[in-house]
Amino acid sequence: MFRHRFARILWALLLALIAVVGLSSCRSAVDAQQGPATGSGPVVRGGELRVGVLGDLSPAKFLQIGTGGLNGHIVANVYDTLVTLDHASPTPRPSLATGWALAPDGLSLSLDLRRGVTFHDGREFTSSDVQQSLLAYLAGPWKPQFKRTAAAITRYDVTDPHRVVLSFAHPVGNIFDLLDSAPIIDAKTLDGLKAGRTFNGTGPFEFASWTPNARVTLVRNNNYWGGSPALDKITFVEGNDPKSLYTRLRTGQLDVVDPVGLTSHDQKLATSRYGFRDIEFTGAESQVYVGVNVANPALADRRVRQAIASAVDRERIMTDVYQGAGYPVNLPWPKTSPAYDASANHTFTRDVSKAKAILADLPPVPPIDLDYSSQGGTSRIVAEIVQSNLKDIGITVDLVPNDPTVHSSKLIGGEFSGLWILEHAFAQFTPSTLAVSAYPFNAAKNASNFVDADYAAAADAAWKTADPSSPEAIAAYRRLDAVWLRELFLVEIGVVIQHATASPNVRDVGWDRRVQFHFAGTSLTNPDRRS
């Protein structure tokens, strides 16, 4: 008996020792993976940056500028734009254009182009490429958000290869939004780009390979006009769901995950508990909303839409679903926008009694479909909360999950039958951009099938004011606000502040207002280390 007891004691001690050694090894591996929290020290050249994303490359939607995604990350790193918009300022900064002058009447813009820039195949960049790129952006097959702005360009003067003059049909207050968003592409290989075979840009990285539903690899452009990047290559690793990307990040298989790659809960867990870096995409806010098809007879009466706006629990959604990474709003503007009006954002709060009182004077509302994207899981949770909120006031909604591609197609075509959940962007640009460019808001054609003369006039007044911060422009923004709060063809829920997640081995990650990564200045503190 004594020998058995002694053996059990020895075995317990051995297990304890193994556990201590194992714990020490795990901590060492995590510490090695995490590295310095600030990524300080000199820039180290070399290494492969592994970036986790949801979804695959889609050539058919390559220039359909939206918020992030694999298409957007490739555009941002393989191609350049004429200007770049700073995160915190509306003032554009030089890129392929080194200087510019807007005519006093706002009807033309001249841009001086950077010399010595070449495409990845070695061809020199000239003013003709600007014209061809914007015409291709306009002609399709893509459906880019700034298409209406590009259509306002009536003439291109490209007689000087290093200077281009754009003439407009009218003053265009958001012209720099277009020039920040539209990539300069190679028209000579346009057919290859449309087919997803050739990606010939002037950007810091060259397109190397694409394995569908698996990965895309970019390699360093050693001849980049802005200086050769530090990274040897970038591999975008495609995940099927946020949990798989979270697991790969935690186990050292990924270095960075883009903002839509993780749930808000997992992103917060990784950065607060496990030492990963939180990268807040300031200036790249999006807004989560309930879209409303006003052509549906059940939703045609604005009083029904007012009841819906009064039923939605914005506070709960922003706190529980987005983990406080944002704030409730009634209007689309983020706090960083010159159009933001804090007082107007208290027009609708959750008030079940008020919503029921509105509906009491109306015929019963029949069941309505509520569409959401099946990708990621966040939209489903928001949809379930909204479904519960509307049940509280006597409105039944049936949840309809959509593949992301189907969901996007329904948005662009205005094909949602009733309500839908999505996040929109473009309020972080020049305010007029929202009403003339974004699919949910475009006064000419929007996903809600909403048509209104006052709305169209306010959108035009905002857009055709050359100075987007002028008193005339601000007055136009207030007119837009009045239409949105009265008609409620979109029910805003809240501003979402986007967050990416990275190992501390990664330093100097850049981004733009479209939630697209920019890795020209990114490096790894120890390129050879892999946990």
Image (spheres, helix red, strand yellow):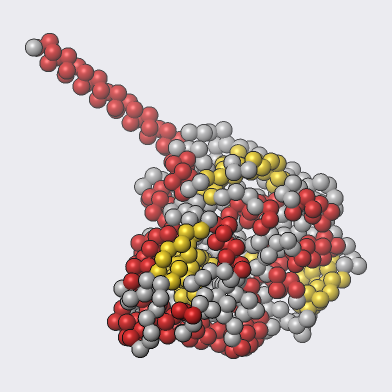
Query: In the orientation shown, which residue stands out farthest toward the left?
Result: 1
Query: Quick check: 112 above or below 374?
Result: below
Image coordinates for residue 167, horizontal then vertical, percent? 81, 77
Depth check, front residue: 3 or 395: 395
Depth check, front residue: 163 or 70: 70
Depth check, front residue: 514 or 438: 438
**Residue 447, picture quadrant:** bottom right
Q: Is residue 218 left or right of residue 116?
A: left
Q: Quadrant of the N terminus?
A: top left
**Residue 67, picture quadrant:** bottom right
Image coordinates for residue 31, horizontal then vertical, percent? 42, 37
Query: In the orientation shown, which residue stands out farthest toward the right?
Result: 159
Q: Is residue 156 left or right of residue 342?
A: right
Residue drawn at (77%, 57%), measured in percent from left and top?
A: 185
Query: Quick check: 350 above or below 251?
Result: below
Number of marks present in the image shown: 0
Q: Tell me if I can see residue 82 in this picture.
A: no
Image coordinates for residue 156, horizontal then vertical, percent? 84, 71
Depth check, front residue: 89 or 358: 358
Query: Quick check: 150 above or below 468?
Result: above
Residue drawn at (66%, 61%), measured in percent from left and top?
A: 64
Image coordinates for residue 134, horizontal then vertical, percent? 77, 65
Residue drawn at (71%, 67%), measured in percent from left and top?
A: 179
Residue drawn at (46%, 49%), measured in percent from left and top?
A: 242
